[in-house]
Amino acid sequence: MFRGAPDGLVEAYDARSGARLWAFQTAPEGARMRPGPAVSYQLDGEQFIAIPMGRELWAFTLDGTVPARGVPVEDPWADVPPSGPAPRETRAIEVATLIENPSWSVGGRRFAIREHAFNPVRAQVSASVRVRFLNNGEMTHTIAARDGSWTTATLEPATWEFVTFDESGTFLYHCTDHPWAIGEITVVP
């Protein structure tokens, strides 16, 4: 599974385990760009992955010799928080979120559902407070702590489940069905 990030990072993940296998930085530090979807194709018997990153199109062979660069892959689930705003105090986290599509802004505002994103991506809650994980998307999602300490049931569209966090700290979680969807929750005393 391949993913492009707004900072120019291209990542390859194992679709079964969610482990990151490879990363390649396509843009200079601090750059922001709009990644497109990755596509796989074959040319003269060789398999390629291509992904648009801003105004550029990057292509890689599956058995190529370009080494990973950018974010190291030795520890694929390092405690690097997701990019985005500071944690927002909340008691509800949405699975899937509504986004405005700026490329369609001529003649009016357009919106879409970003199925593989949490809202907020960084949440802050008080210890012993029940947090509601609400699936407002169109696909099923199962949310789990990266350390395996908790998981929700499979959340069908328009369903939710509560999780209570008793231990203070900052924790990462993800969707087990779509492991590239990552969120962070900070539990304060």
Image: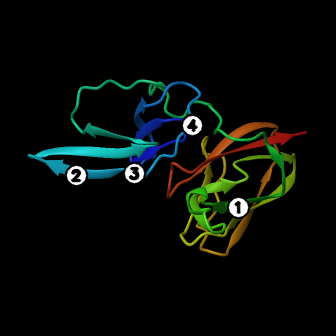
Q: Nearer the viewer, mark 2 or mark 1?
A: 2
Counting from the top left corner in percent of width and height, residue 60 is at 28, 37
Check disc 4 and report the residue beneath it: 32
Counting from the top left corner in percent of width and height, residue 119 is at 71, 56
Q: Nearer the viewer, mark 4 or mark 1?
A: 4
Q: Amino acid at mark 4?
A: Arg
Q: Nearer the viewer, mark 4 or mark 3?
A: 4
Q: Alpha carbon of mark 2 to alpha carbon of mark 1: how far? A: 34 Å
- Please tell me which of labels 4 and 2 falls first in the chain: 4
Counting from the top left corner in percent of width and height, residue 174 is at 59, 50
Q: Residues within 10 Å of mark 4 (few under 14, many from 20)?
A: some
Check disc 1 and report the residue beneath it: 94
> As displayed, is residue 116 above or below residue 29?
below
Check disc 3 and report the residue beneath it: 16
| Contact? badges 2 and 3 (CB < 8 Å) | no
Residue occupying the point 66% across, 55% down: 118
Q: Amino acid at mark 3?
A: Arg
Secondary element at image label 2: strand
